[in-house]
Image (cartoon, helix red, strand yellow):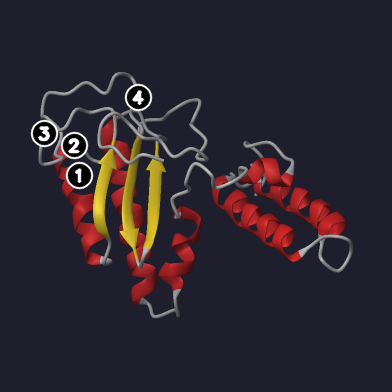
Amino acid sequence: MKREAYPLSWPENYPRKNSRINSRFRGSSVNQCWQLVDDEVRRMGGRNLIISSNLKVKMNGVPYSANNDGGDPGVAVYFDFKGKSVCMACDSYRRVWENTYAIAQTIRAMRACDRWGVSGILDRLFTGFVALTDDAGKSWHTVLKCSPDATRDEVKHAYRKIMKEEHPDVDGNHERAVEINKAYEEGMFHSEPCSDL
């Protein structure tokens, strides 16, 4: 995956939202949100930050103040964390600044979790955000043979079904089990909770 600030370099295995909502965030500028992301990534020890969107940027990577996102408010944030390439992306909201702000607040919350002292929590939290290369393999829903819009219960059901057939103790192999477990983790991260919970 080529990392570019402009145009938007959306991560290949991240599903896009079909509809977007207005956030409850208080008004902010794109530049302020860009700075928030930069500050949070720096505080956690991240390096080589690239914020990618459909907003044209200046030579220093900051977007021009008068900008048109071309109808796509999605934002993908790439950086290196402890030797791994990480990607966080958001297109839940209708404006670029809202999606950028959501990513900044997510990183802030992850840093807060780490401050409480749970051993290695930040490393485990970032497992689902490791940037996938073009040859990274199949998407989680392909591996689990379920819909990309599956609920968490549907992801669990698909995982249990496939592991019954392909567990190393039955007929499968270790590498396949690792692939299935990774797909399960990604699926649980990307799926929505059931509406009746």
Nearest the camera: 178 or 111?
178
Image position of 128 (left or right of 47):
right
Residue linked to disc 3: 58
Q: Tell me the residue that label 2 is attached to.
A: 30
Which residue in the structure is indicated by mark 1? 34
Distance from label 2 to label 4 (Cα)?
A: 14 Å
Quarter occupied by residue 2: top left
Which of 79 and 195 lies nearest the eye of the viewer? 79
Check if mark 4's residue and mark 3's residue have beta carbons within 8 Å.
no
Left or right: residue 132 versus residue 167 is left
Say which element carries label 1: helix
Marks 4 & 1, CB-CB < 8 Å contact: no
Which of the marked residues, 4 or 3, is nearer the chain's N terminus? 3
Q: Is residue 28 visible?
A: no
- Kind of residue indicated by mark 4: Asp
Residue 126 location (% of width, % of height): 44, 61
- Point 65% across, 54% down: residue: 184
Q: Amino acid at mark 2?
A: Val
| Relative height, residue 92 to residue 46 (above, below) | above
Q: Are marks 1 and 2 in contact (CB under 8 Å)?
A: yes
Q: Residues within 10 Å of mark 1 (few under 14, many from 20)?
A: many
Report, in whole angstroms, how far the alpha carbon at label 4 lies from the one at label 3.
19 Å
Say which residue label 4 marks: 72
Real-space CA distance between mark 1 and mark 2, rounded to the nearest whole angstrom: 6 Å
Q: Quadrant of residue 45?
A: bottom left
Ranked by sequence position, the earlier of labels 3 and 2 is 2
- Helix, strand or loop at disc 4? loop
Left/right of residue 57 with respect to residue 6 in the rendered view: left
